[in-house]
Image (spheres, rainbow, N blue to C red):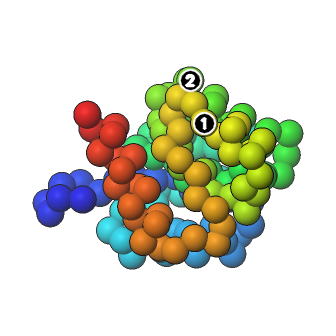
Amino acid sequence: MKKGSSPVNILIVEDEALIAMDLRLTVESMGFKALGTAFSGEESLRKVESLHPDLVLMDIKLRGDMDGVTAAQEIYARFGVPVIYLSAYTDDQTIRRTRGRGSCGCLPKPFEPVDLRNAIARCSQARAM
């Protein structure tokens, strides 16, 4: 991120409250702005519509009827907001599902903060082009 530029606004979608809080603190310590947290795919759609994030950090396995991949595809189709997936599930089938329009990659949990920072920076740069 360039000095003096506005921070990247991020929505966190994670159904585990402690992990969501840790992600929020990590994102904010890196100089990005966490706009809020959604705990389900359905809630993520509502929050993207109302908060207008630049980027979504999306857990793949969520509670409810809509998983993170389905939510991310809908978010990109409706709002054009890209997604970085975060998942403990890194099997081939899951990773294949995360590829496509609007995906800025998938970080396996647990991940290093530097990897998250780099993924956010890459996604932000790609979107600015």
Q: Quadrant of the N terminus?
A: bottom left
Label 1 amino acid? Arg
Mark 2 → mark 1, Cα distance in angstroms: 14 Å
Where does the image place residue 26, in percent across and percent down from the top left?
48, 74
Q: Identify the mark nearer the N-term, 2 or 1.
A: 2
Of residue 112 and residue 12, the one placed in the foreground of this image is 112
* 67 on left or right of 46: right
Q: How many marks?
A: 2
**Left or right of residue 18: residue 5:** left
Q: Name the residue rendered at 52%, 74% in the picture.
A: 112
Q: Residue at x 39, y 46 (%)?
A: 123
For numbered disc 2, what is the local secondary structure?
helix
For mark 2, what is the residue? 77
- Residue furthest toward the top? 77
The amino acid type found where label 2 is placed reads: Ala
Residue occupying the point 46% across, 66% down: 115
| Residue labelled with disc 1 | 99
Taking the spot 39% from the left edge, 76% from the top edge, the residue there is: 29
